Amino acid sequence: MQTAELVSTGAELLSGRTVNAHAHVLGEHLARIGSKLLRDTTVPDNIELIIDAVEGALSRANLVFVTGGLGPTSDDLTREALSRFLNRKIVMDEEMLNIIRKRYEQHGKTLSLEGKKQAETIEGAEILNNAVGAAPGKRIEVDGSTLFALPGPPREFLYVLEQHVLPWLKENMVDPLQLHENVFMICGMGESDILTRFAAHAFPPDGIDIAFCAAPGRVEIRLSTSSDASTLQKAIAEIRKLLGDFIYAEERIDLSKVLGRYLQERQATLATAESCTGGLLADRITSVSGSSQYYRGGVVAYSNDVKIQALGVDPQTFEKHGAVSEWVAKEMAQGVRQRFNTDYGLGITGIAGPTGGTQEKPIGLVFIAVADHDQTDFKEYQFSGNRTWIKENSSQMALDVLRRFLGHISM
C-alpha cells in the first residue's frame, strides 16, 4: 500500500481562527483508492519548520501533500521552503501567468506584482491548474516519492485534488488495493455504549477495520476491508443486528435530510415550537433543499407568555409543572401543529444556560414532544456540556424522536 502524509501550513490553523479539514477530506479520498493517510502535521508560516516537516514526511511516506502558502502575500512561504529544501530554483510559468492575468481582467482588475507571484513554481514541477482560484497546485518527483503542493482554501484544495491529484494517483499507483467500505450513522447511542456492545460480541471480526467519528447526538461508524466484499457484507449484517434502530442511515448524511425523505414519502407536513434551541431545529430542517415541501414554519418561544399566546399552552400547566416539563413540551407540539395546520408538531423545552438550573431540574434537562392528529409522545433527556453543546444535542434528538415516531418504532 502506498502511504501518505499531509503537511498543513498556516498560522491561522494553529491560532484557532480556521478549522483545518484537509486531513479528513484527503484521508477519505485516499482510502477509496487503496492508499492510506498516516500523519497530518500542521506548522505555521515558517520556512525552517515547513522544511523540517516535509523532510520528515518524505522519509516515511511515498506521497507527501503540502497545503497552503501558495498565494501572493508575504506569509505564503511554501514555494520558498520547497525551493530551499529541494535545492531547485523558483521560476515563472508563463502559461500560468497568462491564465491568471486573464482571470484578473475578467473581474476588471489588473494583475499586480504580488498576484504574479502565484504563477511562480519550482523548477521541474508539473503545474496543476486551479480553475476555482488563482494559485495552482504542483506535483514534484523527489527521489522515488511524489510531493504535491496544493492550495489551502478548502474549495481550491478539493478542486485540485479531485481534478488532478486523484486521477494521476489512480493511473500511476502500483497494485492499488480495492477498498470495500460501508458507513453507518447512529443516533441515540453514545460511542462508549457502542464500543461496550461491540466488545461483548467480539466485533469487529478479523479483516475488518473500524473507525468512529462522534458529534453531538450522533456517531458515524465506518467499516472497511481490503479483503473480498463478502467479508464486509457479513460484518454489515452483524452490525445491523447489534445496533438495530439506532442506525438512521447507511450513508454519510445528516439526520435532517433523512427526516425530509420520510416526510416527503408520506406527503406530510411539519411545524416546530422551540424554547431552549432558539431556532436551531428550524435552521437544520430548512438547510435541506426542498424542505419547503414539508416544513411550514415554527415558533421560537422563550418566555411563558409567548408559549401561552402563540402556542396555546395552558397557564395552569406552568403553575403545576413548570416551563421545563413533559406537559409543556406536549402542549407546545400540539399547539404549533394546530396553528400551522400540519400533520406533525415538534416541541422542545429545556435548560441550556447556566442560570436556569436547579437541583430538581439541572442544566441540560430537555423535554421533546411530537404530536399528530391522534396522539402525543415525549422523551426526556439529560445532556451535559455548554450551551452550544446542549442545543446541538437537543436539535439532533428532536429529529430522532420524530424519525422514530414516523417509523412507528417504540420510543
Image: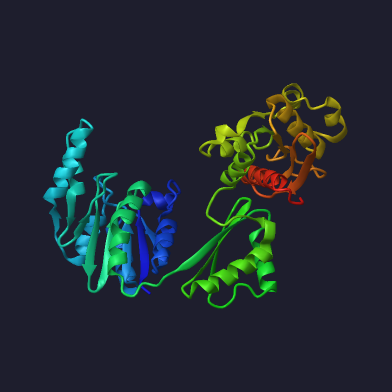
| Image vertical order of residue 95 relative to residue 233, above or below | above
Q: Report the side of 348 relative to 117 (left or right).
A: right
Q: Tell me if residue 45 can be seen.
A: no
| Image vertical order of residue 187 relative to residue 388, above or below | below
Instruction: Identify which residue, 143 or 258, lies in the foreground.
Output: 258
Q: Residue at x 30, y 56 (%)?
A: 46
* Quarter of the image where the N terminus is located: bottom left
Q: Point out residue 111 in the picture as x, y percentages from the top left corner.
A: 17, 38
Residue 369 picture quarter:
top right
Image label count:
0
Q: Report the side of 390 relative to 19 (left or right).
A: right
Q: Residue at x 63, y 72 (%)?
A: 203
Q: Point out residue 343 in the picture as x, y percentages from the top left corner.
A: 70, 33
Instruction: Identify which residue, 8 or 48, lies in the foreground.
Output: 8
Residue that protrudes farthest toward the bottom in the picture: 206
| Image vertical order of residue 362 relative to residue 208, above or below | above
Q: Point out residue 245 in the picture as x, y percentages from the top left corner.
A: 68, 56
Residue that protrudes farthest toward the left in the picture: 94
Q: Residue at x 62, y 46 (%)?
A: 389
Q: Residue at x 85, y 35 (%)?
A: 321
Residue that protrudes farthest toward the front in the picture: 266
Q: Tell me if residue 279 can be seen.
A: yes
Q: Point out residue 330 in the picture as x, y percentages from the top left corner.
A: 78, 36
Instruction: Identify which residue, 192 or 32, lies in the foreground.
Output: 32
Q: Report the side of 339 relative to 389 (left or right).
A: right
Residue 124 picture quarter:
bottom left
Residue 110 picture quarter:
top left
The colour scheme used here is rainbow
